[in-house]
Image (cartoon, rainbow, N blue to C red):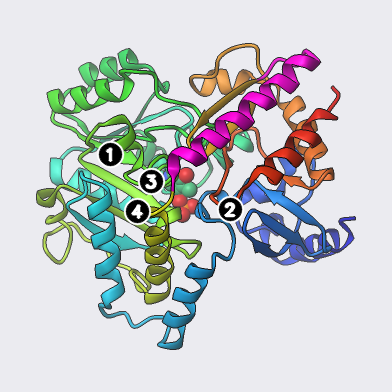
Amino acid sequence: METRSLELFAEARKLIPGGVNSPVRACSSVDSTPLFIAAGKGSRIRSADGEEYIDFVQSWGPLLLGHAHPKVLAALREALENGTSFGAPCEAELRLAQAICAAVPSIEMVRMVSSGTEAAMSALRLARGCTGRKKLLKFDGGYHGHADAFLARAGSGVATLSIPGTPGVPEAVVSDTLIAPYNDSQAAEDLFRLHRDEIAAVFVEPAAGNMGLVLPRPGFLESLRALCDRYGALLVFDEVITGFRVAYHGAQGHYRIKPDLTVLGKIIGGGMPVGAYGGKRDLMLQVAPAGPVYQAGTLSGNPAAMAAGLATLRVLRGLDYAALSAAVEDFCRELEGIFAAKGIPARINRLASMFTVFFSEREVTDFASAKNADQTRYTKFYKHLRARGVYIAPSAFETAMVSFAHGREDFRQTLEAADTLEF
Ligand SMILES: *Cc1c(COP(=O)(O)O)cnc(C)c1O
């Protein structure tokens, strides 16, 4: 029963482009219409139609503690009683900065903003300002928010909708964006050779989460670190998804690579709008008003987002990431077993609390191999699960997000639903 969601969607389409405030939500790539969500608690959400779903989207990553965690809600309530925004410093932003710097060794100073997009855009400006160079190297299928410079062969919604670039981005802006295939160190090196003194920064998701989940091959991130050092460019890790998710100290802690700058978002806001960028002290001291690189924000560091983020990190610090990772590993193995028994070729990429099912015979290591997976099968899988109360990303180019609130029963029900799938 999705009657109410359909009614609301029809109304929304009259007033909001495509009926949604972010493209992938429209569910068009999986031949569906969106569920309107009324409430969430832990691993579950309830639609406007009153149906319950096991949620593997978790707001696309921020909710590593699950929906409506009591400690996060309590911190938010307390903050809200005292007002939502002052446009002046508050203690909570200092405490969140401390928590981030303590967790992520490469971050010595940090600036709060209100979205991952804003954080990536600002980190790029800073990298250009510090190096005096213009070019940016990113990877095919990598997503760093929707700022102009990054919208060349991007992942996430851009990939889902098969938009190569996008109208409205001047060619001159993306002409400084260089693109290499993910996991291809040689291609990155070739671009450095060609544009020696011109590349300001390499932007990379240390585990790519926006073309589905694609893991870095051993040595890939190390090679980027070495190239940046050799050619005087900055290495920027976009950890908007992986920060505090792959490990409390991020993917950079997990893979033991130190970037120069890090872009954060999602989890550090605990479900409130947030982003942050940080890194080496000498670089961050170039940001206004300490330095000349301008960046500002009316709601930056607002007490509500800071309280939700801080409460989230405080709870996460005491949780067992290895246990969650092991639970996801067991679940993925069982799911692989189900597909194997049915003779359905599938590859399940996974890392910590993330996984993506690719209906493919081949290993998925970059955007090309991700696109090679069978999207018609993904659509069937999506619809099949949704009809059985399991909500996964409405796109083959997204990552399933598991939270600490997911338990045995959630995995069991999901496997049971998958087991009745027929192609
Ligand atoms: C979500 C995401 C962003 C953009 O963050 P928003 O808060 O949606 O603007 C940037 N980079 C990565 C890797 C992301 O997953």
Number of the front mark, 2 or 4: 2
The residue pinned by badge 4 equals: 119
Mark 1 residue type: Val
Whether label 2 touches label 4, CB < 8 Å:
no
Looking at the rendered image, the quarter that the C terminus falls into is top right
The residue pinned by badge 1 equals: 236
Whether label 1 touches label 4, CB < 8 Å:
no
Mark 2 residue type: Ala
The residue pinned by badge 2 equals: 405
Answer few, some or many: residues within 10 Å of disc 1's Cα (few below 14, many 20 plus, some between 14 and 19).
many
Answer few, some or many: residues within 10 Å of disc 2's Cα (few below 14, many 20 plus, some between 14 and 19).
some
| Left or right: where 31 falls relative to 65 | right
If you read the primary sequence from the N terminus, does the residue marked by circle 3 or circle 2 appear first? 3
Write the start and end of the magenta stretch as one range: 320-346
Looking at the rendered image, the quarter that the N terminus falls into is bottom right
Which x, y percent locates residue 169? 45, 44
